[in-house]
Amino acid sequence: MRLEPIDHYSCSAGRPWNEDQMGATSNAMWMIDGATSLDPPRLHSMSDSVWLANLVSQQFQESFAEPQSNAQSTTSAVIRECAQRVTAHFPLPTVSSGPLPPAASVGLIRLLDDTVELTLIGDIVIALFTNEGKVITMHEHRSFLEHEYSDASIVDPYAQSRAVRKRRLSYIRGEGHNWVLSNNTDIAVNLDLRTYSALSDPCLAFLCTDGFARAIELFQLAPDWSSLLRAVATDGLGPLGTELRLAERSSLSSTMVKASDDASAMILAIVPDA
């Protein structure tokens, strides 16, 4: 099997920096959504989450540059290496009273000898579709979306800030089995990882951040994910991204913590060996 690019899209939330990062090789594709920094930056001029997203993407690029067998460069080992590199700048323990380390959601699709491996950390949407748009599998954590709704319901901005920080720390610690990639290497043995047998027919692999997922989850710009994939397979991701930004700007109020968010998506074809 091999991956062949079809389209990608990324747009920041009206800022001069973008905390999303994506990449792909012939055997792996990934989406990284840096969580909005809650403290002044230490490692990047704008946001430490930009630094982390770039770090993880570069690590994946190096680790998955060549076709991998099932025994090489396990996903767990690569994720552990990323977390260890964060601890060099933000040692454990992490406490709510001090600066929080940068954190990120990660979605990763790997093609191994005889399997397709899906790894989900945080609130990335991962999906495999047939070429006709039928869902083969969809992988996402609804609890993250629910938490963003609940935090947005807090009227006092200081109380909302405290709630967001508390929630971020719980994700870093992996409480309730909800994780983000940060400076906690325990994540490497708690990965939400799924494998599927090698596919005999070509299919589409899709990754997007929660910012892009608003097109479905918040604004209903398509009736469902299958409809969305059929549309972007024909017209590309750009028109839907533009429509999403228009919907955000025209919305009188938002039930989310952030009225606008960095939005990124990518779609590749998984092509079986001849």
Image: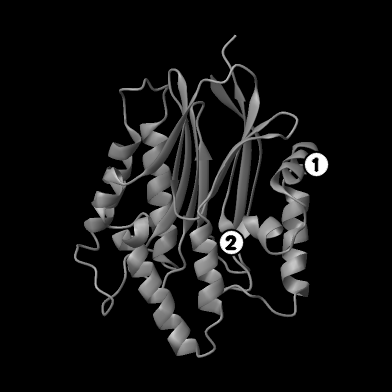
Dot 2: few (<14), some (14–19), or many (≥20) neighbours within 10 Å? many
Q: Is residue 155 left or right of residue 131?
A: left
Above or below, 195 relative to 125 = above
Q: Which residue type does callout 2 highlight? A: Asp
The residue at 50%/31% (across/down) is 25
Residue 39 shows in the view? no
Q: Which mark is residue 235?
A: 1
Secondary structure found at label 1: helix
Secondary structure found at label 2: loop
Above or below, 250 relative to 28 = below
The residue at 35%/44% (across/down) is 191
Q: Residue 167 is drawn in which quadrant?
A: bottom left
The residue at 75%/52% (across/down) is 240
Above or below, 37 relative to 111 = below
* Residue 61 image point, x, y percent: 42, 36
Q: Is residue 53 left or right of residue 259?
A: left
* Residue 103 image point, x, y percent: 38, 60
The residue at 53%/57% (across/down) is 142
Q: Is residue 132 left or right of residue 165?
A: right
Q: Which residue type does callout 1 highlight? A: Asp
* Residue 225 image point, x, y percent: 70, 46
Dot 1: few (<14), some (14–19), or many (≥20) neighbours within 10 Å? few
Residue 3 shows in the view? yes
Above or below, 271 relative to 86 = above
Q: Residue furthest top?
A: 274
- Closest to the observer: 228 or 92? 228
- Closest to the observer: 262 or 187? 187
Q: Which mark is residue 262?
A: 2
Cα distance in 3D space between marks 1 and 2: 21 Å
Q: Residue 38 is drawn in which quadrant?
A: bottom left
